[in-house]
Amino acid sequence: MLNGLSASSGYHLYAPSTDMRNGFNALSGIVRNELERNPLSGEVFIFLNRRRTHIKLLVWESSGYLIYYKRLEAGTFELPKVTLNQKSITLTRDKLMLILEGIELKSVKKRKRFLQQFIA
């Protein structure tokens, strides 16, 4: 399981395919220039290659970037539905975990739960 990735973090899947040779600088550049988000925000940015066999997660922790990288030996990662012009999709941590585990997203039904509303 991925430590350090909390349910309260924002998760953003970059919709276009990404060259998996990209490292910290190139991925943070995509976040800043393509997604127009701050890569130092602590949010998690998710990238897939064209064949959807490799996935990278980029996150800023207190002292530097962290990349989680997974390569499948068989099968592919499921990409949630994306419109043609959409650059990113916001996910929950739960949905990310389903994608990483190879669970088909359209067959998952989430049951109703109480959600605490915080007023600032």
Image: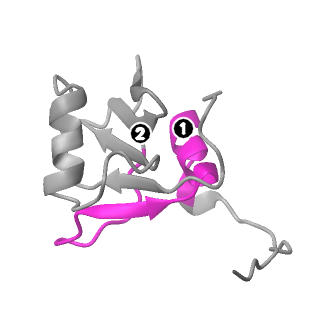
Q: Which mark is residue 77?
A: 2
The verdict on residue 76 being magenta is: no
Q: Which mark is residue 49?
A: none
Q: Quadrant of residue 117?
A: bottom right
Position in image of residue 101 (x %, y %): 58, 35
Q: Secondary structure at mark 2?
A: loop
Neighbourhood count class around disc 1 (C-alpha, 10 Å): few under 14, some 14–19, many 20 upward: some
Q: Quadrant of residue 97?
A: top right
Marks 1/2 in contact by CB < 8 Å: the verdict is yes
Total numbered badges shown on the rendered structure = 2
Pointer 1 or 2: first along the chain: 2
Position in image of residue 58 (x %, y %): 37, 36
Of 67 and 97, the residue lying toward us: 67
Q: Mark yes or no: residue 16 visible.
A: no
To which residue does mark 1 refer?
Answer: 102
Q: What residue is drawn where x is 33% and y is 30%?
A: 53
The magenta span reads 78-105
Q: What residue is drawn where x is 55% and y is 62%?
A: 106
Which kind of residue does numbered mark 2 sit on? Phe
Q: Quadrant of residue 29?
A: top left
Which kind of residue does numbered mark 1 sit on? Gly
| 61 lies above or below 105 | above
- Gap in Å between the C-alphas at discs 1 and 2? 6 Å
Q: Mark yes or no: residue 91 visible.
A: yes
Q: Which of the image's four quarters has the N terminus?
A: top right
Q: Which of the image's four quarters has the C terminus?
A: bottom right
Of 36 and 98, the residue lying toward us: 36
Report the side of 80 relative to 10 (left or right).
left
Report the side of 16 relative to 64 (left or right).
left
Neighbourhood count class around disc 2 (C-alpha, 10 Å): few under 14, some 14–19, many 20 upward: many
| 50 lies above or below 36 | above
